[in-house]
Amino acid sequence: MKLQACSLGRLALGSVLAAGLALPVRPAGAGELPVAPPTKQQPVKDDVFGIEFVDNYRWLEGDNSDPKNMGKETPEVAAWTDAQNAYTRSVLDNIPGRKAVEEKIRPLMEVGSISSPTMRGNRYFFSKREASQNQPLVYYRDGSKGETKLILDPATIDSSGLVTITWYVPSLDGKRLAYGTYRAGDENATLHIIDVDTGKKSDFSIPSKVSSVSWLPDGSGLVYRNLADQNNPYSGQVMFIGMDQDLSKAQTILRQFTKEENAKLATTYGPGGGLDRDGKWLQLSYSTDTRNNDLWVADFAEFKKTGKVNKVDILVGEKAMASGDIVGDTMFLQTSLDAPNGRVFAIDLKNPARANWKEIIPERKDANLTGVSVSKNRIAANYLKNASSSIEIFDFAGKPMGSLKLPGIGSAGLATEEDRDEAYLSFSSYNYPTSIFKVDLTKPDATPELWERPNVPVDPSTVEVKQEWFSSSGGARIPMFIIHKKGLKLDGNNPTILYGYGGFMQSMTPGFSATNFQWFDAGGVYAVANLRGGGEFGTAWHEAGKLDQKQNTWDDFQAAAEHLINSNYTNPKKLAVMGGSQGGLLVGSFVTQRPDLCKAALCLVPLNDMIRYQNFLMARYWVPEYGSAENKDQFEFIRKYSPYQNVKKGTAYPAVLVTAGEHDARVHPLHARKFVAALRDATSSGLPILYWGDKEAGHGQGKPLNLRMRDLVDQRMFLMWQLGMLEGQAQVAK
């Protein structure tokens, strides 16, 4: 099968000139790889604190002539994207064995999913996706085991599968459902309301990225968060509106600072808020960092009567995370205040001075408190120990009542309601399909009752899961999960995917993916490293991988690769690295710092130009995490690792597939575009550098099954091609 050269399409406009063409490469068993479409160089010189940078591909950012149009796509950028996409399709669609791999992956991709139920009275609301459905549907049952009844099917809104129901919140009586929808992954959710019994949708709607919705107890109104201006990601506001009111009558409870009021806090995540179940207390917060916030409460009745918000301080001006569940007049506060691994206080909201706080769940030094939920008589505390979940149960005085029985080492979550001790446990691991269990929190030692588990066409017991530790910079000990087929001969020649994230205090914990079994069946190893910058070991672990400590994250990922090689799992010609978003930045840093350690890389919706990232979309949210090149001290450490600026001519870079979403509201596609152009011009390896700019997707959220299927096959084929697996996989697929 000979790969055909793609048409340059709109490049015929003459907008793109030849520069840095990819070298011909031969996929195994295929003809010559066509030459990649050209990308013109149009140098722009920047002087940043006395350091000169030459940006050859500034034009790929789009229209930067006006701050209001920052990064808006231009015709020549659109032409470049079309040409690159056509080229990438001509390569990936014609790799021999694609059809066999797709046929093997399809039934694994079609494995269904189900959420834990939200309980309102006797009604149980949940989402579920089955077989070939593109998106989850929303259902309810009268009773835990009652008949399943459909409420919402996004396919009736848009048959393309591009519309996502991103959240839903039932009223306390279970008669109405508020829900949010967005299209093509843009995350710009609009709130809608539907009558559960009749299926009639209300004309009532609220636009502009609505989230954090709370119903008044009698269903007469909503407290919610949205953007005052959907084109301004730094215009967050917490609002109240009565169901009988016009949207123009919505009242502001808390809003984001303007730059003139507070330049720093104007570009954090800003305000958040919600109403307690009884409708008595507003809980209000304001982000001061990527993982820290101020916290207040306010009397909601007073607000409704006067229109004024009398905020009462709970935790203000501290470098700490704070959130709580309110029962009656008591807040059960989870906080990292003077406790990097987290602890819980009981606070009397009628007398909330800190001197009156009662610590009911102290900090554990051996585990990180990741979440707290409250039932009628119990508090459930979710801990991570060595990146695996445990759930401990306490009474309201903090007395330990036992721990929930989990199926094994994995990831667990708990759905509770304050009017009952019935709760629903979700559990997943690399070798345990995602399952929902019914539990009684007054009997934590009882065996959980299985409520729902999708059927999976694989045998999870056929894979082996290990956790290994390795050393990184500064003597840090880093854990990593390693998964592969039982009995696999580990001879240093095993194709291996190394995955990581390492940022924003997000934890990479065990989770089930049926599609990984195609990789295991083909003889592959899958490894997930728990890097500094994540949240696996609390606030201190996060702090050790942010700002001027960010190189620690990159060091950890490189050390993980070296461990896999030195422990005889794989070798540099059989190793691929993979990550998305912050993980895309991780992969970009890996490729530019240690290109010798891997053969291939999947760099998905990445940040790559860290000198300019803060100028686009919502990226100033992340300045507390990364810093900004506008600050001289922060510029000094950013420039040392920013992938785009550290691409070096004549370096033998691995094969790289870089993706972007044209509707991405978080990470601008410019990062992927510029990185691909720079790598392709610089590399001496002759290995392919491919770009895929998805015109029907954003950052990845809400992508329908058919597009996720295409993307996964693309990624899997790219890696199997580059790691020399095609012949073996063809045999497996027969």
Image (spheres, helix red, strand yellow):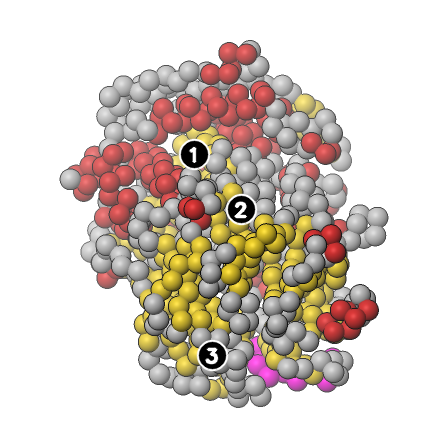
Q: Amino acid at mark 2?
A: Tyr
> Residue 392 got which mark?
3
**Residue that mark 2 sits on:** 182
Q: Quadrant of the N terminus?
A: top left
Mark 3 secondary-structure assignment? strand
Label 3 to label 2, Cα distance in Å?
37 Å
Q: Earlier in the sequence, mark 1 or mark 3?
A: 3
Determine if residue 370 is in view.
Answer: no
- State which region is magenta: 354-363
Residue 323, image quadrant: bottom right
> Foreground residue, 440 or 319?
440
Residue 407, image quadrant: bottom left
Decide whether residue 572 is among the magenta residues.
no
Q: Amino acid at mark 3?
A: Glu
> Foreground residue, 646 or 360?
360
Q: What residue is rendered at 42% in x and 46% in y? A: 155
Label 2 to label 1, Cα distance in Å?
27 Å
Q: What residue is rendered at 59% in x and 52% in y? A: 203
Q: How many numbered marks have been drawn onto this rendered protein structure?
A: 3
* Up-down relation of residue 35 to residue 574 (above or below): above
> Foreground residue, 660 or 528?
660
Which residue ends up furthest to the right in the rendered image? 260
**Residue that mark 1 sits on:** 657
